[in-house]
């Protein structure tokens, strides 16, 4: 019930503002109606309780507005914490976790177990109907071993990363069946090898491969930065594929942003309409990107 002591003019202004926001969002809701949006969820946004609740509400809102969201999540810090608890040493090469048999068992337990079910529970508590999957379910993500090239004493050598994989084939039938219902799929980036091996897959890479296979309208990569920044540290709102390649060559983009941008480029080349790199620390950033005129972060198309 409205507090009668509150200024009626202020109440009316508040209602009008909410109505205006909903009205302006309508064309964008119509644009994404029955379209697939893949959201890679990770970083600080996943570790902050308030942001996690807001994220869950926003994903449920997308589904109820007629959008077909697919959530793909990471979990590096949680994996690291569990490995530490179990006294399993963890090493990295080329930014990828070297994953032996003991480590990949923990990775699967954390990603497909605790983290996946935490997200599913949050979505259900927000009023949605979510189900958790890994790339093993329905052979969703068939994977092959990653063998990156590194350098040691100026000599090129092959690094053995163990059970670190990359998508070899996506079988989207299970996702296509789920999104036709009122259920939101939540995917852990675990792949299955040709001989039944378990592979740990980078969440950005997995999200990009799934978005391509589903011909998604958008792929949203939630990060801990505002988006792609220029050499002066200013946000670049929109870039083309050619500009993205140029930024990687001239040093505008470096470090961990390079593999993210490579995922963006590959996804667009393989049929995703556009990819947005967003700051997951911003409240309701998914809604800002999809349902407002100016969006948020950096759009690559």
Image: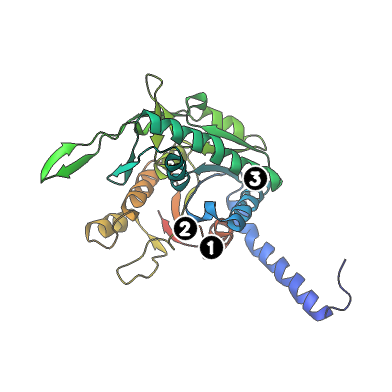
Vertical side of 176 occupied by 72: above or below: below
Relative horizontal placement of residue 220, taking residue 262 as reference (left or right): right
Quick one: 220 or 233, which is closer to the camera? 233
Q: Quadrant of residue 71?
A: top right
Determine whether label 3 and label 1 are within 8 Å by CB.
no
Disc 1 crowd rating (10 Å Cα; few below 14, some 14-19, many 20+) is: some
Q: Which mark is residue 73?
A: none
Q: Quadrant of the N terminus?
A: bottom right
Residue positioned most to the top = 195
- Look at discs 2 and 1 and give the one toward the viewer: 1
The answer to whether residue 77 is left or right of residue 90 is right
- 130 versus 65 height, above or below: above
Question: Which residue, given by chain and number where applicable, does mark 3 sit on?
Answer: 123
Quote the CA–CA distance across marks 2 and 1: 8 Å
User: How far apart in space, not on screen, are marks 2 and 3 (Cα)?
Assistant: 20 Å
Circle 3 SS class: helix
Location of residue 213 (image quadrant)? top left
Mark number displayed over residue 278 = 2
Return the x and y of residue 60 as percentages of the image width and height.
65, 48
In the displayed structure, 186 sits above or below 255; it is above
Circle 2 or circle 3, nearest the eye: 3
If you read the primary sequence from the N terminus, does the residue marked by circle 3 or circle 1 appear first?
3
Q: Which residue is mark 1?
A: 282
Q: CA distance from mark 3 to mark 1?
A: 19 Å
- Judging depth in this view, the residue of 254 and 20 nearest the camera is 254
Image coordinates for residue 116, horizontal then vertical, percent: 55, 39
First of labels 2, 3 by sequence position: 3
Disc 1 element:
loop
Residue at point 51% right, 60% down? Answer: 281
Where does residue 262 sit, x and y in percent of width and height?
33, 48
* Side of 224 where 25 appears, left or right: right
Instruction: Using residue 166 as the reference point, say whether residue 245 is left or right of it.
Output: left
């Amino acid at each position: 019930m409205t507090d009668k002591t509150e200024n009626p003019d202020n109440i009316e202004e508040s209602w009008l503002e909410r109505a205006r926001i909903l009205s302006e969002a309508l064309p964008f809701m119509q644009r994404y109606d029955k379209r697939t949006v893949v959201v890679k969820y990770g970083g600080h946004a996943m570790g902050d309780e308030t942001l996690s609740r807001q994220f869950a509400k926003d994903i449920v809102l997308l589904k109820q507005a007629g959008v077909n969201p697919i959530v793909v999540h990471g979990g590096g810090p949680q994996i690291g914490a569990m490995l530490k608890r179990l006294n399993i040493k963890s090493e990295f090469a080329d930014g990828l976790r070297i994953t032996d048999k003991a480590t990949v068992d923990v990775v699967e337990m954390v990603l497909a177990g605790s983290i996946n079910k935490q997200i599913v529970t949050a979505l259900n508590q927000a009023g949605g109907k979510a189900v958790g999957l890994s790339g093993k379910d329905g052979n969703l993500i068939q994977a092959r071993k990653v063998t990156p090239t590194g350098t040691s004493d100026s000599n090129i050598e092959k690094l053995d990363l163990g059970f670190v994989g990359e998508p070899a084939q996506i079988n989207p039938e299970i996702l296509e069946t789920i999104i036709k219902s009122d259920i939101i799929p939540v995917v852990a980036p675990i792949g299955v090898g040709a001989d039944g091996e378990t592979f740990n897959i980078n969440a950005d890479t997995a999200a990009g491969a799934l978005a391509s296979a589903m011909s998604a309208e958008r792929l949203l990569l939630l990060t801990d930065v505002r988006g792609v920044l220029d050499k002066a540290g200013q946000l670049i709102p929109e870039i083309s594929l050619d500009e993205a390649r140029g930024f990687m060559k001239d040093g505008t983009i470096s470090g961990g942003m390079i593999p993210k941008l490579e995922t963006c480029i590959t996804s667009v080349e393989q049929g995703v309409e556009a990819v947005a790199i967003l700051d997951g620390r911003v409240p309701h950033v998914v809604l800002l990107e999809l349902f407002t005129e100016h969006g948020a972060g950096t759009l690559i198309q």
